[in-house]
Amino acid sequence: MESIPLHNACDPAFARQVEQESGQSLAACYQCGNCTAGCPAGFVYDMQANQIIRGVQLGLKERVLSSQSLWYCLSCSTCSQRCPNNIAVAEVMESLRHMARREGHISAAPINAFWLSFLATVRRFGRSYELGVMALYKLRSGRLFGDLDIAYPALSRGKLGFLPHVVEGHGEVGRIFERYKARCDKEGVKP
């Protein structure tokens, strides 16, 4: 097991910031490991869910925000359901992802490219447009020819529509994104 150098690494304000943004009291975590034991994505994590929480408690901001686990989290809330102290661990992970994005700690760029592509289609059409998501993802990630072997089967089976389904009131969804961006601009953070 790797040791964590605590000198010159702790940021005591980090735990308070995470608690404020997530709305969770992390002092209640006593490291039982239930969140980690139930995590379906834990096998790809570089830091398990309980280690992320412990890192926040210790103020290890750089280490936590640089963790790839934040990007591999499925947001399924299994961890939250299993916590005996009712800590919404998934909320903490989501808050940490936002903090990492704001501070430029994107350690899994393809996942972030997919996320941004997905949100762009929701902003425009009011819901996900799968073919548009994939096209934007390919452009953002630079993986233009990856996964071409599955494109034809998906298209031939009607799994990817050529035209987007525009939701009634999609303009309202777009305005939500605009208000969020205006709030980020006002607070001086990257959306």
Image (spheres, rainbow, N blue to C red):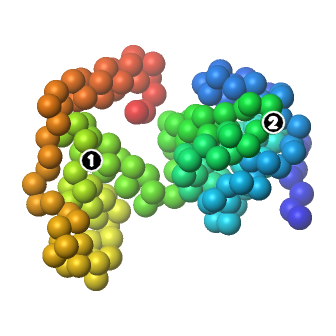
For the C terminus, the image quarter is top left
| Horizontal side of residue 84 vs 183, given as left or right | right
Instruction: Farthest residue to the bottom: give it.
Output: 149
Q: Is residue 43 above or below residue 26?
A: below
Q: In 3D space, how far apart are the residues under numbered discs 2 and 1 (Cα atoms)?
A: 35 Å
Helix or strand or loop: what does disc 1 sit on? loop
| Horizontal side of residue 86 vs 163, given as left or right | right
Residue 14 visible (yes or no):
no
For the N terminus, the image quarter is bottom right
| Towards the viewer: 70 or 28 | 28
The earlier-in-sequence mark between 2 and 1 is 2
Horizontal and vertical percent position of residue 42? 68, 60
Tell me which amino acid carries mark 2.
Answer: Pro
Horizontal and vertical percent position of residue 124? 19, 39
Q: Quadrant of residue 151?
A: bottom left
Residue hosting label 1:
128
* Badge number at residue 99: none
Q: Crowding near pointer 2: few (<14 within 10 Å), some, many (20+)? A: few
Instruction: Farthest residue to the left: give it.
Output: 163
| Mark closer to the observer (2, 1) | 2
Helix or strand or loop: what does disc 2 sit on? loop
* Badge number at residue 84: 2
Tell me which amino acid carries mark 1.
Answer: Ser
| Towards the viewer: 95 or 141 | 95
